[in-house]
Amino acid sequence: MVLVSDGVTNEASDQEIVDIVKEWRTPEQGAKAVVSFVTETGRDGDNATCLVVRLGGWERRSEGGVGSMGTKEGREWRRSEAMDPRRRRTDVQDLIDQNDELARDCLQLSQDLDTEKNERRRLQNRIRDELEPLNFRDTFLNKNEEGGRKAADELLIQVQQYLKELVLDVHGTDVVVRAYANLRGLGKACVKHGTMRATADICLFANGFTRRQPLFDFVDVGLGKERADHKVRETFNFFVSQLQCRHVILGVCHDSSYVPFLERFAADESIRDRVTLLEGHQTGIGIRQLGFKRVVKFNSVFASTPGSNTHSTLEQSRTTMNAGQAAKGPYTFAAVDPRRLGPVLKNGDGLRMDKPLSAEPSLVKAMRQKSLCYWLYLRGHCEGCNRYHGSPPLSVNEQHALWFLARQGACYAHAKGKLCEDPKCVYGHAPWSDQGVKTHAVEDSSTQVA
């Protein structure tokens, strides 16, 4: 009985295996001969295994048939063919070709990965620019637990005053507040911008807020914006379905992702009249078009301007517009010399290359936080955009850092496969990023209030 692996059967037929075993006196010799044959003649010899088991009648194995002579001539020819140097050269060339193909595939995957990273970075920047969450004022956050208590008191006063405007019975109405946030992320943001000394201080603020009023809760939902969104949606669903609930104030105006969720409530007049949208300094695209009649701001409780918004990574350095509102302009900066952006450099294939640029990481980080207008501070003129235009003139090193950030976005013409000939173009023209910026995961630290 002969047992073999696929490394043997892929190179030798069943009859060849049988004939080889018959030529030898012992099973061990026969097994070695089978492995030797496929190793010499095949390309999968390292996967060849053979086991010959001696059963009764081993001595009569050569009886019947033509024996090993049936395949011997063919086997000898295959051995001589395998020893031909020309075949060996072909095998080596096949391996070289396979290696080259794998190298090309690896390079393509690396380029695809870089492209995906750049696209994700641009998407993150776009989301960051468009969504400014509703956050408590710094004057509350920087006082830890005491600030939480004062924030709860001020919020209760503002809500009661608003209910009076709606001609509702304030004294006979309980005010229930649910605030949802990733406390760890919010705490890190507060520490980063100097509002708090330690990340754990945000927990003290939340405790003060929760304990101050019996029906107030500041809930830590953990990492992930979707966790806060889920809590807000389910809480809103619960209260608007209760007839005992006289009115709901919902603080999600900054987030356009709530538009599909709120559309069905906006269409129901019995619910729409019982809902007020709590607005910060920015309203997401589509929120205002939903048809809710009431919108309110509690400026004494929540940050109402970009400069007072602790969560924003662009604190005190950007001008935020309401959705759909056009930026004022144009802006001109005579101190900027755009000629230093040129001339246009090209490689040996005639494709545009970016000029060598050196930027200090600390300045890159500072420029990213300021969200300055690339066109105004690098080219000297901007017709109007939602970036910041009020900064004093930049130093040369600061301009290099801002130009470094601008290059993270691909030139529009270059991305479309066209040749950019604009010597003042500030965007990137490399086929893939060769000046990568390190990015770090940022925990979601937005606060949702229902």
Image (cartoon, helix red, strand yellow):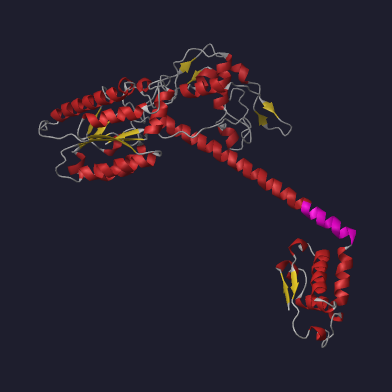
Task: Pick out the residue farthest to the top.
Answer: 335
User: Given the current orientation, which residue lies at the most extreme bottom position?
Assistant: 64
The answer to whether 50 appears left or right of 139 in the picture is right
Task: State whether residue 424 is above or below residue 101.
Answer: above
Query: Looking at the picture, how far across and down is residue 115, in whole percent?
Result: 58, 39
At 31% from the left edge and 44% from the top edge, which residue is drawn?
261
**Residue 192 percent across, percent down from the top left:** 44, 24
Question: Which quadrant holds the N terminus?
Answer: bottom right
The region drawn magenta spans: 84-95
Please name whichever residue, 350 or 131, is drawn nearer the observer in this view of the structure. Answer: 131
Q: Magenta region's main secondary structure? A: helix
Residue depicted at x 31% and y 42% = 231
The answer to whether one can see residue 298 in this image is: no
- Quadrant position of residue 60: bottom right
Quarter of the figure with residue 164: top left
Q: Toward the viewer: 1 or 289?
A: 1
**For residue 307: magenta?**
no
Give percent across and percent down for residue 106: 66, 45
Which quadrant of the figure contains the C terminus? top left
Q: Residue 204: which quarter of the image?
A: top left
